[in-house]
Image: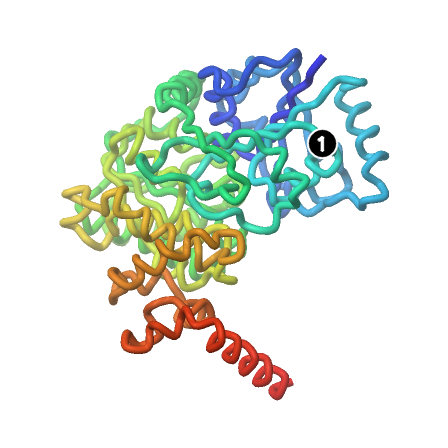
Amino acid sequence: MTTRILLASSLAGTVTLAAALDAGCLPRADRTVLLLCDGAPAPEAVPGTAESSGFERLRTRFDEVFSWNDAVAPFHPSGWQPRADDVPLWERHFRRAWGLGDDGVELVLESPHAGPSQALAQVFTGVPVDVYADGPGCYGPTNGKVPPLTGTRVRRLFHPDLVPGLRPLLLAEYGVEPRAVPDEAIGAVVAELAGAPLDLPDVEAPALLLGQALAASGLLSPAEERELRLEMVRGAAALGHTRLVFAPHPWDPAGNGAALTAEAARLGVGLTVLDASVPVAAEVLFRRLRPALVVGCSSAALLSAAAFHRLPVATAGTGTLLERLTPYEHEERIPVTLVDALLPRLDDASAVAGRTGRAATELSGLVSAVGFAMRPKTGRDLRPAAERYLAAHLDGHTWRYFKRRRLASLALPGVVPARLAFLRRNTAVRRVARRARALRDRARR
């Protein structure tokens, strides 16, 4: 027998897996196991994926559902990695806990460089691996080092087609071919979720504000995130919306609801804060509330609202987030870049009204340039595209996606004067520059 283990750390990931199974993207296995990982900073303090509204409707697609958190307790589910000498012991433990016996195993993982995915690939050595993405992170380069013994086992990459025409870079260094999960399959799964009993406020065509728990993820300070949410309330009110609904992130159930309600009252608009104790997929809210506007920072749901639901969307705070992301190769850089480049800003009323944004076909050069700057070693073949883009498009607006120091270290256009551009390709000059930097750093120490 063959048992396929599908790892999911969110309701969005479970939706993507369910749609992939329904569409036949994954061939049938003798047994299908859904392995849930709740990777919040304090998983025991927030509701998990299994407690989300409509999850039971998705559960029918899997023979069994297990918890990764329980399997590796008391370790934190996102940070634990097996020691090399302990791998055989952990495999026996997982096989016993999940009733695998002597079954052959196949893995369907999220980003293979991340904690649980990497740990599973290490424990089940040599088994076939498929990878899926539930958001725009797949359009960026592989974030982190994927061991060759894992990367060479990856057969397929599944992803929702959030930016039609844009090819994912994830695992491209291993020649993995991306495959989009059909929009119709994802829509059918979301419709199934939306049909579950759900207590939502009766608000007609509201502006829906999406929380992201950016402070809990360490991307912004609590004060910055609080100000960002207030900015969303003010921006929606300035556009003429008098009915607002705020959807807190499950990791941040408090969501600063009191401060937002007070600000809305000051502006003379109504604000309803949704109950975060039962997580609801943003796509379900799109179907049930039919918002007149969806506002967020860098949430993948913004791209989903625009691409799949044809809803007006607006972004807030992406410029601040682009500045705060460190190191430059941070896994959120491509998602934030895409949202910032493709969708209108909340403070640009004409762009929001016209639903304008950069065409997806124009994003390929930008993503190639940012992707190469993030991971120049694994994305060497992206250098020509990056040089072409930077030479032609680097201006006052697009500089926000790059760091001068990073471009200089990679000898990319934008820092070196045009008349000296030939030096970028001179290996001797670059060797001398590297030695000079090494001597400078040594002298500073």
Percent x, y for residue 284?
A: 39, 26
The answer to whether residue 367 is above or below residue 46 is below
Q: Which residue is mark 1?
A: 126
Q: Is residue 23 left or right of residue 350?
A: right
> How many numbered discs?
1
The residue sitting at 33% across, 63% down in the picture is 400
The residue sitting at 40% across, 56% down in the picture is 370
- Can residue 367 be spotted in the picture? yes
Location of the N terminus by quadrant is top right
Percent x, y for residue 150?
A: 65, 39
Percent x, y for residue 317?
A: 35, 56
The answer to whether residue 47 is above or below residue 32 is below
The answer to whether residue 26 is above or below residue 92 is above
Choose between 209 and 413: the one closer to the eye. Answer: 413
The residue sitting at 58% across, 51% down in the picture is 144
Choose between 276 and 341: the one closer to the eye. Answer: 341
The residue sitting at 65% across, 85% down in the picture is 445
Q: Is residue 25 left or right of residue 43?
A: left
Label 1 Cα neighbours within 10 Å, binned few <14 / some 14-19 / many ≥20: some
SS for tag 1?
loop
Amino acid carrying label 1: it is Gly
